[in-house]
Each structure stands twice: as structure tokens, then as C-alpha cells.
Amino acid sequence: MTQTLQERITEAAAYIKEQGVKQVDVGLILGSGLGELGEEVEQPIAIPYETIPHFPVSTVIGHAGQLVYGTLGGQMVLAMQGRFHYYEGYSLEDVTFPVRVMKELGIHSVIVTNAAGGVNTSFEPGDLMMITDQINFTGVNPLHGPNDENLGPRFADMSHAYDAEYQEMVRKVAQEKGVALKEGVYMGFSGPTYETPAEIKMARTFGADAIGMSTVPEVIVANHGGLRVIGVSCITNLAAGMQANLNHEEVVETTTRVKETFKSFVKAILASM
Ligand code: HPA
């Protein structure tokens, strides 16, 4: 018997509650090389993805593949150490399933993070960028198909995909902490290839400041479910054509270099929510 999306969400959430997850305020999606923040969760309960009913299983190196529940920055958080990408072969319903489940568990807001290529010529590898808006250039949409009105509206409004009040708060936190925060538009490609220099030129013309292969579907589903969103990109490299060549090693190196700043910044954001 095939189950509805809502039935699968309910079963996954019930299992997670059985593991001791109670009140949750904020969901945290930790991108490539940024999963270490999950280790700072106090009194953690870790739940491997493969144990959760209907959860896909993570395949990418540098993604631990578990939920971590506990206190971080004074908030009750559920952190995803590792996320699912469309390029791995998952459907977008699978990619965004954890967001649905976190919403079911009671979160009101989600912080999405990622490693991204810098398209804006003033960015440097190692910069942190607050995402102010996004462009879905993946050619697909996680809300494609029948809509469950209980999960959200058929035609979801994306006018305020990244919450404006939160953006103000994040700017203040950056100032207080002396973080030279950049901001801009994140453009999502499907991957897994990096882009061509011509695609990057197009992306810049289209208004992108950073580019990546994640985040966009999760933020669409978060908006569909009425969640407030904060987005933080770690600019790990300059995008194609702006530096000699691109490789995953540089992405990992840069996240390793800036992870202490990243971790204390996200904790400070949580403390201000
Ligand atoms: N392009 C796409 N995704 C990325 C990049 C990039 O340059 N860097 C890190 N993730």
C-alpha cells in the first residue's frame, strides 16, 4: 500500500519523538563541511538518518547523515548533519522530506547553510554571505505534482523567501561579532557539474551573487509550510571563470578554515532569535 506524503511525515516524526525529541524551535541544515556545528549541541540526541522511517540516506563525503537534537544558542534545535542533494539521484520530495518532518515536529524557523561559489566579483573565498533571496535555476520544483492543502497552498508565495526581520537581526549580530558579512542572491543549479564560465557570466547578469547545488528546494518547501528562513552561505571558491579551476578539495579546505567563525556566528544568530 502506498502511503501519502502526510502519512510518511507522521511516521518519521513519531519515530523521532520516540527517540526523545520533545519541543523543537529551530531547524538547522548544515551544508558541506559545516556539519561540525552539530557537535556543539548540548545534551545531544543523535538519530542516524538510516534509522528514520522514509528518510533517504546521505551519500556525499563530508556529510555525516544524522539528526542532532538538543540546545544550541539557548534554542531547542534539530540539526541536520548532512543533507540530500538532487544530484545524488533523490527526488525533490526526498530532498525536502526532512524539512517537512521538522515542521511536523514543531519548528517555526529554519537556518539553511551551504558551501557556495562566489559570483559577485567583490567576494573572496572564506566570506560568509547572508542569503537575501534565491533564484531557482534547477529546472525543477519540489512542489511539482498534487498539492496537500494541509501542508501548504498550491501556489506558494515566495515574495519573502528569506525572512526580512531575521535579515535585520542577522546584520546586527554580524556587526556585534565583527563578522564582515556579505549578502546577496543565491542561485541554485542542479549540479553535479560545476558551472561553465559562460553560465557564471549569465548568473551574474541574472542577479546572482553566489551559486550552489542545494538549499533552493528546501527553502521552497519551508515557505510552503509557513516556516521563517535564515540562509547563510560560506563562499568556498570563486565561481567558474573567476579562478583557474574548481575542485571539491578547495571547498573542503575553505570550510575548514572558516568553520570556527561560522559556528560562533550561527550560534549567535540562534541566541538572538
Ligand atoms: N558552484 C556550485 N556549487 C558550489 C560551488 C560552485 O562554485 N562551490 C561550492 N559549491
Image (cartoon, rainbow, N blue to C red):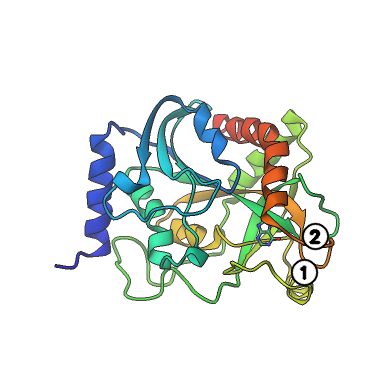
Please give the label number shown on residue 16: none
Choose top left, top right, bottom left or bottom right for residue 246.
bottom right
**Could you tell me residue 159's position as x and y percent?**
56, 64
Q: Residue at x 84, y 62 (%)?
A: 244
- Distance (Cα) linking label 1 and label 2: 7 Å
Q: Is residue 79 left or right of residue 178?
A: left
Which quadrant, please, contains the N terminus? bottom left
Q: Which residue is mark 1?
A: 204
**Which of the two residues, 82 or 182, is positioned nearer the viewer here?**
82
**Which of the two residues, 164 or 227, is positioned nearer the viewer here?**
227
**Could you tell me residue 226's position as x and y percent?**
42, 55
Q: Is residue 240 left or right of residue 226?
A: right
Local SS, label 1 = helix
Q: Residue at x 76, y 44 (%)?
A: 126
- Could you tell me if the residues under marks 1 and 2 are in contact, i.e. CB atoms within 8 Å? yes
**Which of the two residues, 70 or 252, is positioned nearer the viewer here?**
252
Which quadrant, please, contains the C terminus? top right
The residue furthest left is 1
Q: Residue at x 24, y 51 (%)?
A: 10
**Could you tell me residue 67's position as x and y percent?**
40, 40
In the depicted structure, whether residue 34 falls above or below residue 72? below
Please state the quadrant of the image where ligand 1 appears.
bottom right
Choose top left, top right, bottom left or bottom right for residue 105.
top left
Give the total number of marks visible in the rendering.
2
Q: Which residue is mark 2?
A: 120
Circle 1: residue type: Arg
Q: Mark 1 or mark 2, which has the lower sequence index?
A: 2
Local SS, label 2 = loop
Mark 1 Cβ inside 8 Å of ligand 1: no
Q: Is residue 249 left or right of residue 92?
A: right
Circle 2: residue type: Asn
**Could you tell me residue 192's position as x and y percent?**
59, 66
